[in-house]
Image: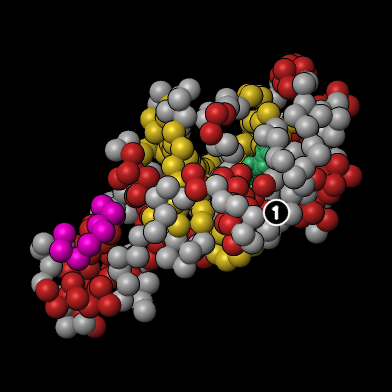
């Protein structure tokens, strides 16, 4: 099988020519894929022979809605998609005044092992293909009817641990013949893989880089994020400075506030020391409680923010959207996996989990 949906229009044109078809068919195919075509019959402007070849090559493998939760509070929608191989991933649609934003997953599971995160509990299963990254945007838009203007790579997985496919996805989603979403409307969040940050800086893209910092000192950060063992806070912040010098884009630092772990006045002061003089923005995230974890949300978010601002560091507190629907990533997939496991062990089933199942 050829992964046609991961190809650029130019690559699809070359493929069409190899199939004895004119090159312009490549652009037509790409346009159909970008609209979330779900059957061959829909592609009315393509000859039958080409449609059949596309079908044989698996050009229609589209994610299926395994579960969908709609927040009554703010209209946030969380999707659990079932992929062609049966694996599940999550995507969240968030509605803001400035437009609709979609938070997508980059891997099935995650290898990074952060102590507070639900996505990493079962490890990494596999990388998502560029098509699977893109389909989350296309099919969320198609299913919800909401036109999507912003993308954040902040769902399940570590995007820089799936560099090639993420890079390809950015090319596809940005393409004028497809979704045409501008790089300035895309954010990529990383736990801090330095080689990946340096590589991304070289690409010269105008996307926003978010770095999950979560602690200003190596002791705390290593406790929370095993990735910190390989390269500490100093090396990470140096990579962030290089990124800013190359791209001119302000870096956003994410900081999940955890009670008694990273929320002390001493840590706020140290964070300010480290970020002072850099063009940065700190995004304080109220910790989402994860069942399997003993870590608790901090009651000191506002005080921590005030302390940073007094030192001239811009800090905002992330609004919690979809708090009634487990909208922080990884939790829905965990629940579905557990429900499936209990069912297969014959310990009873929660049929509500797969209302759209096949
Ligand atoms: N792997 C990437 C992107 C996925 S996580 C990264 O590490 O940045 C997206 C963001 O959610 C990260 O900042 C992550 O640290 C944060 N996060 C994960 N679990 C969380 C939780 N339980 N509460 C609050 N934030 C969490």
Helix, strand or loop under label 1: loop
Place residue 312 in its image quadrant: top right
Residue 280 placement, left or right of 103: right
- x and y percent of residue 85 in the render? 47, 68
- x and y percent of residue 2 in the render? 36, 77
Position of 107 relative to 155 (above/below): below
On whether ligand 1 comes within 8 Å of the CB at mark 1, the answer is no
Name the quadrant of the C terminus.
bottom left
> Was residue 351 drawn as part of the magenta stretch in this picture?
no
The type of colouring in the image is: secondary structure
Q: What range is drawn magenta here?
A: 34-42
Q: Residues within 10 Å of mark 1 (few under 14, many from 20)?
A: some
- x and y percent of residue 77 in the render? 44, 36
Counting the numbered discs, the total is 1
- x and y percent of residue 253 in the render? 66, 37
Along the viewing direction, whichever of 228 and 196 lies nearer the viewer: 228
Residue 61 placement, left or right of 282: left
Q: What residue lies at 55% left-to-right and 47% top-to-bottom?
A: 350
Can you see residue 88?
yes
Name the quadrant of the N terminus.
bottom left
Place residue 11 in its image quadrant: bottom left
Quarter of the image where ligand 1 sits: top right
Q: What residue lies at 31% left-to-right and 49% top-to-bottom?
A: 179
Position of 71 relative to 218 (above/below): above
Position of 284 relative to 30 (above/below): above
Q: Which residue is mark 1?
A: 121
Can you see residue 174?
no
Along the viewing direction, whichever of 97 and 232 lies nearer the viewer: 97
Q: What residue lies at 78% left-to-right and 21% top-to-bottom?
A: 300
Along the viewing direction, whichever of 163 and 46 lies nearer the viewer: 46
Q: What residue lies at 35% left-to-right and 60% top-to-bottom?
A: 62
């Amino acid at each position: 099988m050829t992964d046609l949906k991961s190809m650029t229009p130019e690559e699809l044109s070359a493929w069409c020519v190899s199939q004895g078809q004119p090159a312009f068919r490549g652009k037509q195919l790409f346009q159909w894929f970008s609209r979330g075509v779900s059957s061959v019959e829909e592609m009315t402007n393509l000859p039958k022979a080409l449609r059949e070849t596309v079908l044989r090559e698996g050009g229609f493998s589209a994610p299926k809605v395994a579960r969908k939760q709609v927040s009554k509070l703010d209209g946030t929608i969380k999707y659990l998609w079932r992929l062609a191989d049966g694996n599940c991933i999550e995507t969240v649609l968030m509605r803001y005044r400035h437009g609709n934003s979609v938070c997508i997953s980059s891997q099935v599971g995650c290898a990074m092992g952060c102590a507070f995160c639900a996505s990493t509990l079962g490890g990494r299963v596999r990388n998502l293909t560029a098509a699977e990254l893109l389909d989350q945007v296309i099919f969320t838009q198609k299913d919800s009817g909401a036109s999507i203007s912003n993308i954040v790579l902040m769902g399940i997985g570590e995007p820089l641990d799936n560099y090639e496919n993420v890079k390809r996805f950015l090319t596809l989603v940005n393409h004028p013949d497809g979704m045409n979403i501008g790089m300035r409307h895309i954010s990529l969040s990383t736990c801090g893989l330095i080689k990946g940050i340096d590589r991304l800086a070289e690409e010269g893209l105008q996307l926003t880089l978010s770095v999950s910092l979560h602690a200003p000192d190596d002791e705390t950060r290593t406790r929370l994020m095993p990735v910190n063992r390989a390269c500490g806070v100093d090396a990470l912040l140096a990579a962030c400075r290089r990124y800013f010098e190359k791209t001119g884009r302000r870096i956003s630092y994410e900081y999940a506030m955890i009670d008694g772990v990273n929320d002390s006045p001493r840590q706020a002061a140290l964070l300010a020391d480290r970020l002072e003089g850099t063009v940065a923005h700190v995004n304080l995230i109220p910790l989402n409680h994860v069942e399997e974890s003993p870590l608790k949300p901090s009651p000191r978010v506002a005080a921590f923010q005030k302390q940073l601002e007094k030192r001239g560091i811009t800090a905002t507190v992330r609004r919690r959207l979809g708090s009634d629907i487990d909208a922080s990533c990884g939790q829905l997939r965990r629940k579905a996996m557990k429900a499936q496991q209990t069912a297969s062990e014959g310990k009873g089933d929660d049929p509500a989990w797969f209302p759209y199942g096949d």
